[in-house]
Image (cartoon, grey):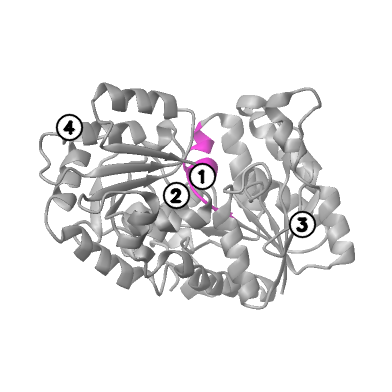
Amino acid sequence: MRILIVSHLYPSAVDDTAGTFVHQQVRALRGRGHDVRVISPVGWAPPGLSRYAAHRSVPRCTRVDDVPVLHPRMVVLPGARLGPGIVHTTLRAIAGHVRRTYRDWPFDLVHAHMLVPDGWAAASAGHAVGVPVIATAHGSADVLATPNRSPAWRRTVIESITELDQIIAVSHAVARGVCDLARPRQGVRVIPNGADPDRFASRDQAADRSRLGLPDDRPIALFVGHLTDLKGVANLIEAFGANLNRSTTRPVLAIVGEGPLRGALEARVRELGMGDTVRFAGKVVHDDVGTWMGACDVLVLPSLSEGLPTVVCEAMVTGRAVIATAVGGTPELVEPGVTGQLVDPGDVVQLADALIDVLDTPGRAAAMGSVAAGRARDTLTWAAVAQQIESVYRAVLSREHAVASTWDPADGSTPPIVA
């Protein structure tokens, strides 16, 4: 099949880690023999504003791992001040490129990532050239939180849901969020995110720790993500601080990622006297995330909201226990006491207790990680995900939506994760 991907989240010269989950999916689809191209709009940066100079360095046309990528420009304002109007800006940016691409390379369907702005814009642009349009709903940024920003945002998300030919959700929680807002044309297909076993499976923990300069005689907890309020990193630091005098193993916390809270988080670490306990690694390329996963004993994700976190899939494929908040689709991956622990979002005491339970009990993290790996390596890989997505493509193109693999919200049943 010829597949056109529309996603404003995609690796570029501005941010080579943006949308890596989309790119990994694209690579897996290409691995199954499909011809895939990408349109990924980027913000237009007016001359004279040095803050946005990097955006001007993004080429209009490039390749990422031999995947052709177009980067049309779109007008954006700092702080998301365009509001739901961003969907119209996105449509203006991609519409001409969709038409010209179809003229020169007639694709079979469009697959957008995020219901807004990409899914809304792709539905209009794709239908204009007569092809079906699919979108993947990823969670907070398009379904779980965005509709609550304003009535206008809610209407826009609903418009996207009702215009798309098929919606894929990364978790049951996201699927229910979609159907709580509106009735999709063909129900919702639930397909989780995945991980690349070539990067994450069969890691040598001692070698990875040596490569990163991490101690080999202390357990290591790892956080990977943006340093924002939504990710709950401040709660994680408080939980580690609460355990300073409780833990017998003196665990280390490694924080991989950048964000607006980094300065405040580093200051809090100094206030708590945890200079030898917390290590800020900053932003790392995606290939190096596998090294950090291999070095740790447990991944900790204290988010206040999630869709289906790719980082949890990566940890499980690596064979690592997971301590996470019970939000979004995370409980669909982590089984308490078996592959990790779940805690309530924002509860520092629960988080501290879970860390003690997993890291201070000899062999507990390793045992949980072994079970996690066994469950993940056949189902939470990008190859498995691509196979399921391909089945959705074929169903949409043939107009055959099998009842067994599509969730109809009218019957009140829980949507299945297709294996």
Q: Position of residue 62 (x, y in %)?
A: 77, 55
The answer to whether marks 4 and 2 mark residues whose Cβ atoms lie closer than 8 Å is: no
Circle 2: residue type: Gly
* Left or right, 143 with reference to 347: right
Q: Where, quadrant-wise, is the N terminus in this rendering?
A: bottom right
**Amino acid at pointer 1:** Val
Residue 307, which numbered label? Answer: 2
Q: CA distance from mark 2 to mark 3?
A: 26 Å
The residue type indicated by label 3 comes to: Gly
The magenta span reads 136-148
| Magenta stretch encompasses residue 137 | yes
Q: Which residue is mark 3?
A: 126
* Camera-nearest residue between 178 and 205: 205
- Which mark sits nearer the N-terminus, 4 or 3? 3
- Residue for badge 1: 143
Q: Callout 4: helix, strand or loop?
A: helix
Residue indicated by mark 4: 242
Mark 2–mark 1 CB contact (< 8 Å): yes
